Image (cartoon, rainbow, N blue to C red):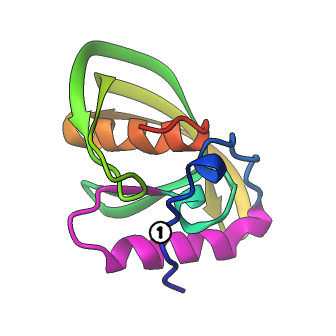
């Protein structure tokens, strides 16, 4: 189901709860909502009103989802100016050109641990989503 984008900064500032396999409905709502938006590279569950550590993003293989994502390695820092659907302003942030992320994937109703490397624009979008999971307003 397509959800409205949350703009309540107090809600968005709360660290997300760990996601479980029972959050499959949240995953689907996140994918539906992201797919309905123009010019949006990443969306976190708290942006649709669900305080769960889940992000969806546009990757090289289309829309992808991570549950409980954590950056485990990063290289090549830089500064970027990012916008956010939940905020009415751009913010200067520190990012990394290359990251390695450990996360859970929902496969056949169960969580499976995975690790992936990302670079460039996709790495920036994933970092933005992970910041949302931490309750960090960009």
Q: Residue at the location (31% across, 36% down)?
A: 123
Residue at numbered disc 1: 5
Q: Residue at the location (55% across, 67% down)?
A: 48
Binning the other alpha carbons within 10 Å of mark 1 as few (below 14), some (14 to 19) or many (20 upward) gives: some
Up/down of 43 relative to 92, above or below: below
| Rendering quarter of residue 26 | bottom right
Q: Position of residue 120 (x, y in %)?
A: 20, 34
Quadrant in which the C terminus is drawn = top left
Main secondary structure found in the magenta portion:
helix
- Which residue is at the far top? 76
Q: Provide the secondary structure element on which disc 1 rests.
A: loop
Query: Who is closer to the viewer here, 74 or 112?
Result: 74
Q: Is residue 38 magenta?
A: yes
Q: Position of residue 100 (x, y in %)?
A: 43, 27
Up/down of 67 relative to 96, above or below: below
- Which residues are the magenta region? 21-43
Q: Is residue 83 magenta?
A: no
Q: Position of residue 36 (x, y in %)?
A: 34, 80
């Amino acid at each position: 189901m397509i959800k409205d984008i949350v703009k309540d900064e107090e809600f968005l500032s709360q660290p997300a709860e760990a996601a479980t396999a029972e959050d499959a409905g949240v995953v689907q709502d996140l994918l539906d909502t992201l797919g309905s938006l123009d010019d949006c590279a990443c969306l976190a569950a708290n942006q649709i009103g669900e305080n769960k550590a889940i992000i969806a993003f546009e990757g090289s293989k289309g829309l992808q989802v991570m549950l409980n994502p954590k950056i485990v390695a990063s290289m090549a820092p830089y500064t970027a100016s990012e916008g956010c659907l939940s905020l009415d302003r751009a913010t200067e942030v520190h990012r990394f050109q290359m990251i390695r992320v450990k996360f859970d994937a929902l496969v056949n109703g169960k969580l499976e641990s995975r690790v992936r490397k990302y670079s460039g624009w996709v790495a920036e979008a994933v970092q933005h989503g992970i910041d949302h999971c931490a309750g960090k307003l960009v």
